[in-house]
Amino acid sequence: MTFPLQDLLAILPELIVIGTACLILALDPILGADKKDILAWLTLGALAMCMGLPSSHLTGQTYAFSNLVVIDSYGAFWKLLLYIVTGLTVLLSLAYLKAERLSIGEYYGFILLALVGMMVMVSGADLLTIYLGTELMSLSLYVMAGLKRTEARSLEASAKYFVLGAFSSGVLLYGISLLFGLAGSTRLSVIAEAITTHGTANPMLSLALVLLAVGFGFKLAVVPFHMWTPDVYQGAPTSVTAFMAVASKAASFGAFLRVFVEGLGGASADWSVLFTIICLATLALGNLVAIVQTSIKRMLAYSSIAHAGYALIGVVVAARHSGEGTSSGFASVLLYIAVYSFMTLGAFALVGMLRKEGQESENIEDYAGLAKREPLAAFFMLVFLVSLAGIPPTAGFIGKFYIFMAAVNGGMTWLAVVAVIFAAISAFYYLRIVMVMYMREPEGAAAAHSRLETSPALSFVLACALAGVVFLGLFPNGLWSLATHAAPLLK
Amino acid sequence: MTSFPWLSLIVFFPLIGAVLCFLVKAESSRWVALGFTVGNFLISLPLWWLFDSSTANMQFVERASWISSPPVNYSLGMDGISFPLVLMTTFLMPFCVTVSWTAIEKRVQLFMSMLLVMEAAMVGVFVALDFVLFYVFWEVMLIPMYLLIGVWGGPNRLYAAIKFFLYTLAGSLLLLVAILALYFQGGHTFDILELSRGTYGASLQMWLFLAFFAAFAVKVPMFPFHTWLPDAHVEAPTAGSVILASVLLKMGTYGFLRFTLPMLPDATVAFTKPMIALSIVAIIYGAYMALAQSDIKKLIAYSSVSHMGFVTLGIFVLNIQGIEGAVMQMVNHGITTGGLFLCVGIIYERTHSRQILDNTGLAGPMPRYAMFLMIFALSSLGLPGTNSFVGEFLVLAGTFVWSQFATAFAALGVILAAAYILWLMQRVVFGTPAPAHRAHLLDLNARETATLVPLIVLVFVLGIFPNPLLTRMHASVTNLLNAQKAPAYATAPQQPALPQPAATMAAMSSSSSEQAAAR
């Protein structure tokens, strides 16, 4: 088997990232403990190179490696988002690892390996490619979740994540094998053809759909496959949590949409019902359980579950109604996840760096009186929370606006009404943090108050996240045209 | 018409001040806020003369594309209905700053900044001509208001703040869905004027009416959605109460006038009876609740429920006296109740109690204060010669045309208002002076006098010469009623302006001012 140069050029970004990952793993033992920062800058350099690559392939679809991989504007959208959030995560990690006194060089290697997995996921044209990407991402994340080796909770998170993740991968693989049995191939295009010719009235197909939905449900962290999320998000180092909540979710949505639309689009009438139920359950449980959390990391975990529910509205609407509404439905999902990434990353960055006596201030109570001690940090948090609640003029509002718009356009106004009711409920728990920050005084000794451990890298991350949230809230045109440009290729 | 961007200037000028407040010391931030609120009033003042009262068209229109797909425009404009409300807002804001001058001691910069953000958002709501833009302004003010109540409020402020926030948000999110539904039914536009020209099916109108109602009725607040109001009013700092009572409540009734009536004419007619019934219940229930209060602020809060009942009553009787009376009453309530809240804030700063029984017999130690309070109180009960009389009289006249029976019940509210206000005055102003330290109460200082006098002047000016304001809103209200009636005669060509009610109104308003002048 030979690899023509064209194919290699098509996956040049993946090659750059994986090459850098290997370089980092090789350099790590050589560098002294105080020089690990170099690895972070190397990572950022690789990301910058990937972003700088010519994007002339944004139009049309290019297949590579005998149709295993596809390069198109849809994948490019996700990759661009992944580069940005990975870059911000690396900068956040620079500050976070120092504060946690973790000097682990391979950390950055794992981030890049996970990134390659995600990039493969969003550009896979074959179920097996996508599966391989998912595994690469997940395995790297299992390790990263357990990086705080001395902390039992981190190890527990890693183990839990691994067991449930491995289980869900198994289910996913089972679904893939059933589809292979039906269509004789794991190529998405071939599966799509098989569904068109043979129809959807096949119990085996339904079973495969359910298994794939379960497998992707775990990765997307939607109800009822969300059980691992709060524990893992809470136990993992916060920079890793941010990476999981944002990048892993984005990549999972990217792969999920591609599989279910490009491959299983013919059976959308079947799976859209399934996902309508999942969507409702996710909205309800995510938003309701978030109310009672006392740990901000757990609250944000449930909030990220709930946000996946909002994004699913766009998927369901687009799947049920072909025609003009479809592409705007998918585009609204892409826009929503992009917007979600900025606000969630910003919130987690603050959570990781607000510290009390060297420890992360994880309890919501630790935020009491923050507006007085750290007015700027409290203001940033306020903006992120307001955006998460979907209140204008932030990006969160724009995201919800397009999602609800797609729902009303698709004739599912009732779903939009249910979603706005839960949006109002969600405002309660987001505002509770605002209340604690602005309207309460801390109890206990003055020395034990949490403060923000600032560093240039962290300031940059926060500034970027804030700029993203505010800018996209005021001028969403650019992102929306990117999203609409990327979305129609799905049909 | 002028091409100068007056409205953008009025909306965004306070925001500059809001940023500036953070950059200066606490002491200077008060001056910054005062400068920017006074400046904004001065900027908006020329509009009084530039405003063309002969046309119902939007004036000072600005338009620019904001979101290209779906087409959301940054379009602003003003007609005879929004015009008085904008001027009222910019007029009142400087007094919110001066009354907070010494009352707010902690985090002054944030407070002043939030006041300025509120001003921008409130003016934005009244001048937005794009439904999404309107919604954005409508929601933007939730956060500053939440902070105003929650950070600087009374003992139970956390509960009041979140209750205010969630009530308003839940209602307005349903409005968002309705806006989107209108977009797809109304020719793929968010332009308020174009949407107002469209016609919509009967059942769609019913649903949209209910969604609009959820948003606007909570804000007004109409019975039975009023329960957030007493909590929010009582806990909010004085400036917050003034903003709430004078401007925020008007957004609900403005919403009815700007959106519900022109866009959903059939549903409006269908829901007239329940809406009027709710208004009358609010008038009487609010008045009865006010009678039972021992907290001055809570009493005024319930009186607001009652007074806003008159506004919604005037809107839904759907005739020119009713609606002009409603707009008039919106402005009057803003001035009078704003003045009452300012008075309560001033006395609270001295006695640290809002209880009626802790603040009795103020006429002795504080004669000037007592006089001002009395004037606002008499205005609140609608004494002829004061501003509220004009509005309430017009509303009742409009209701009389609709149903004499309803008028009888609504008029009961006026009588009850006299009861609770006079009883309040009897205790607070003329009661036996409370404990000894009350004797040391200082009368109004120059700053406080300067805060109240302009409002007092307006109470009499609008009470005796309401016509300059009425003529400015006349064309728009007539146009609104014509548009409202048009779908009922869908087959007939454009209806000419109905001359008869207009003439009645002119006669009535002039006679009312004559009456007032006679006293």
Image (spheres, grey):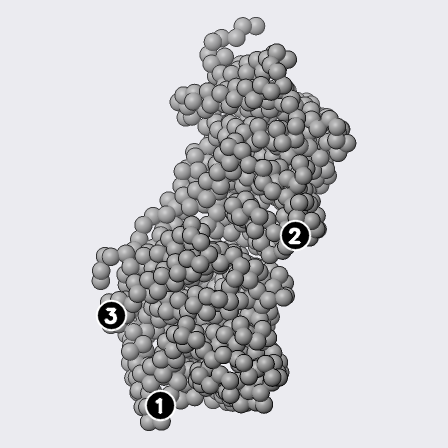
Of all residues shown, which one is farthest toward the bottom?
B518
Whether residue A90 is visible to the viewer of this picture, yes or no, is yes
Q: Do circles 1 and 3 both sit on a common chain?
A: yes
- Label 3 sits on a secondary structure element that is helix
On residue B516, the disc is: 1
Q: In the image, is A446 to the left or to the right of A112?
A: right
Residue B97, above or below A64: below
Q: Kindly report the distance in space between the C-alpha atoms of the residues bearing marks 2 and 3.
A: 53 Å
In the rendered image, the quadrant that contains the N terminus of chain A is top right
Chain letter for mark 1: B
Query: Residue A57's spot in the image, x, y percent?
Result: 42, 22
Question: Residue B57's image quarter?
Answer: bottom left
Is residue B396 visible from the viewing direction of this image?
Answer: no
Quarter where residue A256 is shown:
top right
Q: What label sits on residue B408 in the rendered view?
A: none
What residue is drawn where x is 31% and y is 87%? Answer: B510
Q: Is residue B3 above or below residue A105?
A: below
| Labels 2, 3: one chain | no
Q: Are marks 1 and 2 on the same chain?
A: no
Which residue matches tag 2? A442
Disc marking residue B49:
3
Residue B483 lies, in percent from the top left, at 35, 69
Q: Are marks 2 and 3 in contact (CB under 8 Å)?
A: no
Look at 46% across and 12% down and name the residue there. A6
Residue at position x 44%, y 51% from top? B22
As helix, strand or loop, the secondary structure at mark 2 comes to loop
> Where in the figure is residue B59, as x and y percent of width and height?
28, 63
Q: CA distance from mark 1 to mark 3?
A: 25 Å
